[in-house]
Amino acid sequence: QVQLVESGGGLVQPGGSLGLSCAASGNSFSYVAMGWYRQAPGNQRELVARISSGGSTNYADSVKGRFTISGDNAKNTVYLQMNSLKPEDTAVYYCIAQISSDIYWGQGTQVTVSS
């Protein structure tokens, strides 16, 4: 049973920074990729950033240049550093882990950008 434990959400002012982390456990196979999705009220869930086991990354256009995803394969942990946050970044952020073609989801952590 794969478990993803997220941490680091919270309230931040516009222009501020916040870091998220997600640790995966319960699996003896290698992860193909890990990443972050987000869902704002009334919106569909969208990909924020993804990193493959080889280190390749891709980002949503809306966060390029502001967010940085990184990973630690030895710890099965993925990080998301969010800078220059905007009110429109407010959402529940979900960690994902991909094993083969299966996607596993974390429980989500709230990020609120507001003055």
Image (cartoon, rainbow, N blue to C red):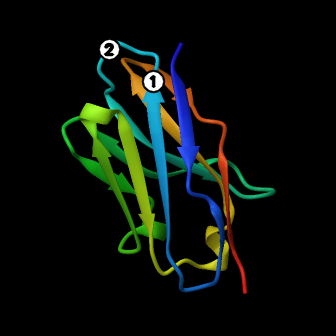
Give the residue type that dot 1 points to: Ser
Q: Residue 82 placed where, x, y %?
A: 46, 68
Q: Residue 59 placed where, x, y %?
A: 39, 57
Could you tell whether 37 is left or right of 60 in the image? right
Give the residue type that dot 2 points to: Phe
Name which residue lies at 36% across and 17% down: 100
For residue 83, what is the image quadrant? Answer: bottom left
Placement of 60 over or under 107, stated as above or below: below
Placement of 18 over or under 106, stated as above or below: below
> Which residue, given by chain and number where applicable, does mark 1 sit on?
25
Q: Residue 93 placed where, x, y %?
A: 61, 51
Q: Secondary structure at mark 1?
A: strand
Could you tell whether 24 is left or right of 58 in the image? right
Name which residue lies at 69% across and 49% down: 44
Name which residue lies at 61% across and 84% down: 14
Q: Quadrant of the N terminus?
A: top right
Give the number of the disc on residue 29: 2
Name which residue lies at 30% across and 45% down: 71
Q: Secondary structure at mark 2?
A: loop
Q: Residue 92 placed where, x, y %?
A: 68, 53
For residue 73, what is the image quadrant? Answer: top left
Placement of 67 over or under 2, stated as above or below: below
Q: Residues within 10 Å of mark 2 (few under 14, many from 20)?
A: few
Q: Nearer the viewer, mark 2 or mark 1?
A: 1
The residue at the far right in this view is 42
